[in-house]
Image (cartoon, rainbow, N blue to C red):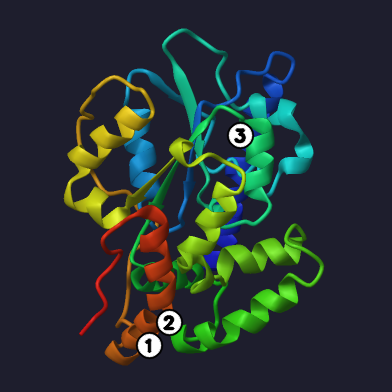
Amino acid sequence: MSPAGRRGAVDRLRRTVRSARAWGRVLAPGALPDFLIIGGQRCGTTSLYHYLTAHPQVRAATGKELQFFSLHHGRGRRWYRAHFPTAAPGRHSFEASPYYLFHPSVPRRVAETLPRARFVALLRDPVERAYSHYLHTRSYGAEPLSFADALRAEPDRLAAALRDGPDTRAAHAALRNHSYAARGRYVEQLERWYAHVPRERLLVLRSEDLYADPAGVYAQTLRFLDLEPFVPPAFARHTRRVDRGPSELTDALRAELAAEFAPHNARLAALLGWSQTWPTPA
């Protein structure tokens, strides 16, 4: 079976198990989540998800990446609630779907459904994130182009897919698979979120800080979520992709991408009050 076929089979099995659990509880659905990890993709969200699930006050949804506010919004809130435990004193539930930060329809939907929830976003050097995203898409057979060619094709791919709006099957496929540079323009995504969610309810972190000081960033996240101090057994990195072969992120392409992202990073620093985002290569 091809990599794409294997991934499809695993995804179908995961959806089947998750749906069976959810529909088994649909007559007595749980409470809506207290917080969400909203992204970004390839930015350490899986690691943070596992660190939070280890906390004794936290109960995760039936699986990571429910994608309710992006892919499955038409199924209704009752379907969504069925993925969460019932409310209990001192307990907090959550889910993590990295597509939420990027998809343009999500902030409004979230604000309408979760008016008191809190949100955590992780941002990674957009150059590194873009290439990691490319390797991830290529690993399951959805990217036939080289990295350089995929970047050149991205604007036309996204424009064609979005012609009929952001919620068609074609749009979701392109937005999820081929948004290598677009997802690194974080300031645009956060401005959309801030238009619907108060700033004080959205914590923005750098992935590099999580990797360098996982205990410190984890403690910061717990304070933001009003969770008691706790240290998980380990701060292991979690990823679903292994790099293979020589890198296509050449020095020239890295410099080109860094220059492209520079004005967006400057706006991001101004928006968040950061002294800097990611250093530009010399």
Of circles 1 and 3, the one toward us is 1
- Mark 3: give few (<14), some (14-19) or many (20+) Cα within 10 Å: some
What's the residue at 35%, 31% (across, down)? Answer: 224
Alpha carbons under labels 1 and 3: distance apart: 42 Å
- Marker disc for residue 274: none
Q: For mark 2, what is the residue? A: 260
Apparent side of residue 101 relative to residue 23 in the rendered image (left or right): left
Q: Is residue 180 above or below residue 44?
A: below
Residue 256, numbered label: 1
Q: Which image quadrant: the N terminus?
A: bottom right
Residue found at the very far bottom of the displayed protein:
252
Give the number of the mark in front: 2 or 3.
Answer: 2
Distance of label 2 from label 3 (alpha carbons): 40 Å
Residue type marked 3 = Arg
User: Mark 3 highlights which residue?
Assistant: 18
Question: Rounded to the nearest whole Å, what is the CA distance between mark 2 and mark 1?
Answer: 6 Å
**Label 2 SS:** helix
Q: Is residue 40 above or below residue 83?
A: below
Q: Amino acid at mark 1?
A: Glu
Which x, y percent locates residue 196?
62, 44
